[in-house]
């Protein structure tokens, strides 16, 4: 079910929108996750589905150019009621209700804070703009506080 929602659902949505996007000059913007680029963040089905979306964005961008631009935004840890994917069952709890989750996740990224949903909105606005991103396609913006540049070394001291 998770894989069907995250991959097949996006593909069906893309197919359903092609004619209208060609008429209006619109673009497709998909939401991924930083799990689309790294293992260990959400379990095998979630990580596999998010990795598949990277290929889908690139292939759709190739097939639909020059008429439709296709891009994505990959948020990192965000303060939402998204459920933990460890069990995929009713015992799963929202990540933002796990004691210590926010502090632990904030310590793992260079910008040392968890995003709020509105922290990602500007990326969508930019990618939707023909004026500001008219030559941008097959691009995925990482909105994750610098997750990909974090070090395996000791944690950086937290700002006071």
Image (cartoon, rainbow, N blue to C red):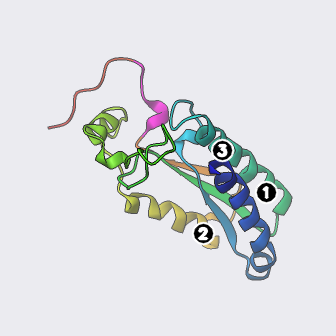
- Residue 54, x across and y down, in percent: 68, 46
Q: Is residue 67 above or below residue 141?
A: below
Q: Is residue 136 left or right of residue 91?
A: right
Res. 49 mark:
3
Q: Nearer the viewer, mark 2 or mark 3?
A: 3
Which of marks 3 and 2 precedes in the sequence? 3
Label 2 Cα neighbours within 10 Å, binned few <14 / some 14-19 / many ≥20? many
- Residue 71, x across and y down, in percent: 66, 57
Q: Is residue 54 above or below residue 110?
A: below
Distance CA(mark 1)–CA(mark 3): 16 Å
- Residue 149, x across and y down, in percent: 46, 31
Q: Nearer the viewer, mark 2 or mark 1?
A: 1
Q: Is residue 7 left or right of residue 90?
A: right
Q: Which segment is the magenta one?
A: 146-152
Tell me the residue that label 1 is attached to: 60
Distance CA(mark 2)–CA(mark 1): 16 Å
Tell me the residue that label 2 is attached to: 128
Residue at 62% from the left image edge and 64% from the top image edge: 133
Residue at 33% from the left image edge and 40% from the top image edge: 111
Residue at 65% from the left image edge and 56% from the top image edge: 5
| Placement of the C terminus among the 4 image quadrants | top left
Q: Are marks 2 and 3 in contact (CB under 8 Å)?
A: no
The kind of secondary structure element at disc 3 is helix
The kind of secondary structure element at disc 1 is helix
Which of marks 1 and 2 precedes in the sequence? 1
Which of marks 3 and 1 precedes in the sequence? 3
Q: Is residue 58 magenta?
A: no
Q: Is residue 6 above or below residue 107?
A: below
- Residue 42, x across and y down, in percent: 51, 38
Question: In terms of depth relative to the viewer, which is nearer, 117 or 147?
Answer: 117
In this figure, what is the number of numbered marks?
3
Farthest residue, direction front: 90
């Amino acid at each position: 079910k998770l894989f069907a929602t995250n991959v097949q659902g996006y593909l069906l949505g893309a197919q359903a929108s092609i004619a209208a996007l060609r008429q209006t000059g619109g673009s497709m913007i998909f939401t991924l996750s930083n799990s689309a680029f790294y293992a260990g963040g959400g379990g095998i089905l979630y990580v596999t589905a998010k990795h598949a979306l990277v290929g889908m964005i690139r292939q759709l961008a190739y097939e639909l150019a020059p008429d439709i631009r296709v891009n994505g935004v990959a948020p990192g840890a965000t303060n939402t009621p998204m459920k933990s994917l460890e069990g995929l069952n009713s015992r799963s709890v929202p990540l933002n209700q796990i004691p210590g989750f926010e502090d632990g996740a904030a310590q793992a990224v260079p910008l040392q804070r968890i995003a709020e949903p509105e922290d990602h909105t500007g990326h969508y606005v930019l990618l939707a703009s023909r004026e500001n991103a008219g030559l941008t396609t097959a691009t995925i913006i990482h909105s994750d506080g610098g997750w990909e540049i974090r070090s395996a070394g000791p944690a950086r001291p937290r700002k006071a």
